[in-house]
Amino acid sequence: MLATLIGVAMNFMGINPIDALFDTAVLNGIVAPPLLVVVMLAARNPKVMGDQTIGPLLTTLGWIATAGMCLALAGLAFTTIVGGGR
């Protein structure tokens, strides 16, 4: 019910829902790389995970995904600064 009310309020405030979805996706892309770093550090830490830490394969794949997200964020920043963004 709350989501419906927020959607109706956005409509009356003149906010374009597609622009709101786009902006939310951009915000998620900005927040994701630091969160991935924290998750990777926690997943390998025995003090946090006990004996359930991730192995070398998942560590490698996780850091590759984290690096990919960081590169995507760098690309977003570059295109925004240079003017190739939205």
Image: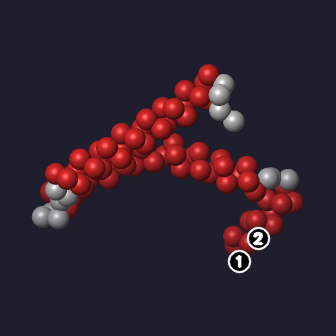
Residue 49 locus on image (x, y percent): 20, 61
Residue at coordinates 51% horizontally, 42% vertically from top-left?
30
The disc labelled 2 sits on which kind of residue?
Leu
Proximity of marks 2 and 1: CB atoms separated by less than 8 Å: yes
Residue 30 lies left or right of residue 12; in this view the side is left
Residue to which mark 2 is pinned: 5
**Which corner quadrant holds the C terminus?**
top right
Q: Secondary structure at mark 2?
A: helix
Image position of 39 (left or right of 82): left
* Residue 76 seen from this side: yes
Residue at the far left: name it.
51
Q: Most extreme residue toward the top, as rendered?
A: 82
Residue sitting at x 69%, y 70%: 3
**Would residue 68 be found to the left or right of residue 49 on screen?**
right
Which residue corresponds to the image point at 40% horizontal and 49% vertical from the top-left? 35
The image shows residue 76 at horizontal and vertical percentages of 55, 34
**Above or below 71: residue 12:** below
Judge whether residue 45 can be spotted in this image.
Answer: no
* Residue 53, horizontal then vertical, whole percent: 18, 59
